[in-house]
Amino acid sequence: MSEFKQVALIGLGLIASSISHAMRRAGMETRITGTARSTETRAKAAELGLCEVFETAREAVEGADLIILAVPVGAMAAIAEEISPVLKPGAIVTDVGSVKRAVIDAVQPHIPAGVDFIPGHPLAGTEYSGPESGFASLFDNRWHILTPPDGTNPDAVKRLTEFWKSLGALVDVMEPDHHDLVLAVTSHTPHLIAYTMVGVADDLSRVTESEVIKFSAAGFRDFTRIAASDPTMWRDVFLNNKDATLEILGRFTEELFALQRAIRQGDGEHLFDYFTRTRAIRRGIIEAGQDTDAPNFGREGPSGKDE
Ligand code: NAP
């Protein structure tokens, strides 16, 4: 049960609306306040009853003992600056941004003494955005990574950990640069590759008319789902996790060239060994409970069965 009396959600999109639903599901009686940039989103959030909606972040944060920044990474600094004067002593500020080092650099300078800033990242999401896209089970059995700076009050870390656990998440603590490298491998670079592959297919579809859509097979369809993710969020991820993404992209390109050479030279052994190794990783993810082992990732095809 949350010991926070008032939680402020800044940004009312997929992640913030899911937090609101998950808090309600957990039976928390916490007061939830919040705001978003546009009047449309604020009106929708009020209609959905996600929280008490305010026009500005400053008003939403007033009196809150937990403040969750759930805006794109590039918007964090301005929000932190805006709310800084009204943060209550003893309050905890956290965020849900997909990049951690850049968020720390942007937010930490605005955090007054007596307030703890504990950056966080839920490894949970979908390709949908906005206040209507959230759901209570989004964080269930998904990792939530906290990257508290040195000297953070351990009691505040404990309270925030308990909060995320009560939303269904598993919580781990990591060093921010390590987080950014791990996520460059597991999320950021795969998204870039998906965006690229869908872009290539889009160029090709101008040649093949609608065949790319009509005969779209499982591999390509999964890329299109990932490449449908929010453009603002992902632009900010790449602008703010530049070094790690470029490092992993470099390694990716080398591997791709090696596979390209194996195909050209008819080196079936290389291809077979490589694909055998990668198959084991999929098994590991399923065994860790981070995905389903149902065919086609548990989804049904348009014909009602796996294709
Ligand atoms: P979202 O659904 O697009 O919602 C973003 C919210 O931020 C909207 O309410 C938006 O308001 C507001 N906002 C955008 N720009 C703003 C600005 N300049 N100033 C004030 N408010 C602004 O995004 P989300 O998926 O919830 O993502 C929020 C954060 O979670 C991001 O930092 C992202 O990296 C992180 N995250 C996302 C995922 C995912 O899969 N989506 C997973 C883990 C972490 P308007 O609607 O009025 O524009």
Image (tube, rainbow, N blue to C red):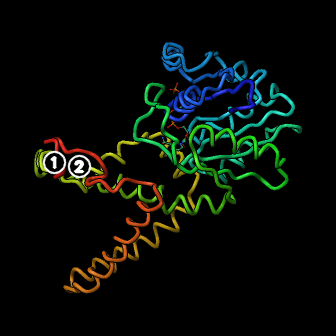
- Please give left or right for residue 256 compared with residue 161 in the image: left
* Amino acid type at image mark 2: Asp
Image point (66%, 61%), residue name: 177
x and y percentages locating residue 48 in the rendered image: 49, 17
* Numbered mark located on residue 251 in the image: none
Label 1: how many Cα within 10 Å (few below 14, some 14–19, many 20+): few
Q: Is residue 218 visible?
A: yes
Q: Is mark 1 within 8 Å of ligand 1?
A: no
x and y percentages locating residue 207 in the rendered image: 12, 52
* Amino acid type at image mark 1: Arg
Q: Could you say whether the residue bearing mark 1 is in a helix, strand or loop?
A: helix
Image point (76%, 21%), residue name: 62
Q: Could you say whether the residue bearing mark 2 is in a helix, strand or loop?
A: helix
Residue 197: quadrant of the picture: bottom left
The Cα–Cα distance between marks 2 and 1, rounded to whole angstroms, is 7 Å
Quadrant holding the N terminus: top right
* Numbered mark located on residue 206 in the image: 1
Image point (38%, 76%), residue name: 255
x and y percentages locating residue 201 in the rendered image: 23, 53
Which of the two residues, 64 or 248, is positioned nearer the viewer here? 64
Which residue does the numbered mark 2 point to in the structure image? 202
The reply to whether discs 2 and 1 touch (Cβ–Cβ < 8 Å) is yes
- Please give left or right for residue 33 compared with residue 65 in the image: left
Which of the two residues, 45 or 301, is positioned nearer the viewer here? 301
x and y percentages locating residue 59 in the rendered image: 72, 18
Above-or-below relation of 34 to 260: above
- Please give left or right for residue 5 compared with residue 14 in the image: right
Q: Is residue 199 visible?
A: no
Residue 3: quadrant of the picture: top right
Above-or-below relation of 119 to 190: above
